[in-house]
Image (tube, rainbow, N blue to C red):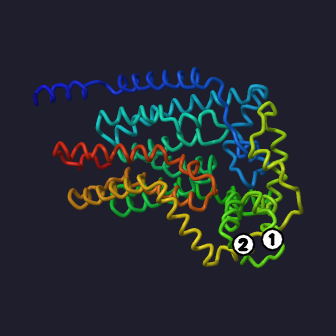
Amino acid sequence: MMKQNNRFQNKINSIPDHVFLGVILVVCLFYRLFYFGILHPGMVLYNSDSVSYFATVDLFRGIVDLYRTPLYPYVLKFFEYISKDHLVQNLILFQQIISFLSIIPFYFVSKNIIKNKYLIIIATIFYGCWHPILIQNVYLNPESLCFAGSTLMLFILVKYLEKPKKYIAVSMGLFPFVLVMLKPTYLILLCVVLVFIIFRFVLFREERKILYWGLFGFFISVAGVFGYCEMNNRHNGQFALSNIYVINSLAHISASGAYRQGGDEEFIAIIDATRHKGYYTAPFILNNYSLDNYLKYYKKFPQYLPPTDDILFCLSIPNTVHYSPARVSQFLKKSQCTMIYFRYMMNRAVDIISAYGNLFILFVLQSVIIIVAFVKYKKIAWAQSFCILFVLGQFFSILIGGLDDIDRCLIPAYPFIIQIAASFLAVLTALLKKEKIAELML
């Protein structure tokens, strides 16, 4: 029986990657055709945020939006240029294609991180067919591109770990900037990449000449972020990557009641008078500049798509005076520096951990495995540690993000989470077979 199992295992291992990948792509393609062609034909999803991505951007003329980084608005602008009448259909087709093609790098990432042939196939099919990923492909939001972006970042990482090269190191430092321009939550990725480079720099002297190129790419990314913030400062009067943080923070002080200690009686009165209408009413009133832009961008939004309830909510907010950003910022900081706000955020953190308890248990168990592998085999699981750090960073963005955006904030981390879960199962499988887990630590 043992010989038969070994023969079967050898036959499986002898099958080329392109065969497995081809089968996986066919399975995922047929499932997607069934899902969107038969179960949900012509599905288009959008919300109030979708309107805001129709922002006017022109980086060459210094025109940027204070609330939306420019990559997705540029994608919309491109398809609007191709055909305004068929913008939605063309955009969704583009997102479907990008999502489908991202299965290819995901497979090779899984091959390097998971290393168990069966789990590689399962993880890749799961990535290609999982409903929370598929549904974003028909959403007029940048999240569908985030899956491909996160997967490509992992692909660059594992390629570097396989064989460090200068151009890969530069890409590792530069690509986070592209992702930040897609969605500001990727800002945490710059921190994770910096930690990765520093640790490799300290531990591997022979790798330092290559890592200098990684630092070069990283500093270009940082310069790009600061340059974009300066463009916002010149065009919109605020040095910020995205001022959506202010709106979310105002919603948090409204929800917590900390606004009553903000020291601005007019703002307190506005929040008192509008809280029953929703926690985002006052933030829009206090940030009236964003409301002006929203009304302008709605005119560019495809008018044949009927407005959703949240779009109607945004359009119904009264247009009032413009309060200075400095005044809003002072009120916000004073409200946040209170015990009420601190307790609110601690309770929010507990609620998030409780809501995603299974994920946090997975992270703890995988972290223990990483530590044990380091102590016993003197081997660092670089890729898995990178994944865990990035996902934890996304949970921090959830903490300070929108009140109703918990699941959405976690979307960029989905490919990382799948890799962590599959890696954990690969380690359990190896332990059951009494094999060493050192080979699984990349």
Crowd class of label 1 (few under 14; some 14 to 19; many from 20; radius 10 Å): many
Residue under the image location 76 percent in, 60 percent down: 276
Q: Observer-nearest residue: 39 or 388?
A: 39
State the residue in front, 146 or 334: 334
Residue 210 shows in the view: no
- Identify the residue under disc 1: 267
Q: Distance between the residues labelled 1 and 2?
A: 8 Å
Q: Residue 259 carries which label?
A: 2
* Residue 15 horizontal/vertical position (percent): 28, 24
Q: In the figure, 103 relative to 57: above or below?
A: above
Amino acid type, mark 2: Tyr
CB within 8 Å, label 1 to label 2? yes
Please indicate whether residue 333 sits to the left or right of residue 101 in the image: right
Q: Of marks 1 and 2, which one's residue comes earlier in the chain?
A: 2
Residue 54 higher or lower than 271, as above or below:
above
Asked whether residue 112 is in view, the answer is: yes
Q: Where is residue 160 in the image (x, y as percent from the top left)?
A: 40, 46
Q: Disc 1 residue type?
A: Phe
The image quarter containing residue 317 is bottom right
Q: Quadrant of the N terminus?
A: top left
Q: Is 373 displayed left or right of 393 in the figure?
A: left
Kindly state the secondary structure of the residue where label 1 is placed. Answer: helix
Residue 268: name its quadrant: bottom right
Residue at image position (59%, 69%) is 344
Rate crowding at label 2 as few (under 14), some (14 to 19) or many (20 or more) other CA atoms within 10 Å.
Answer: many
Per the image, label 2 sits on a secondary structure element best described as helix
Q: Relative to 93, say whether 385 is above or below.
A: below
Residue 28, given in percent of the width and then of the height, sits at 46, 26
Residue 395 marker = none
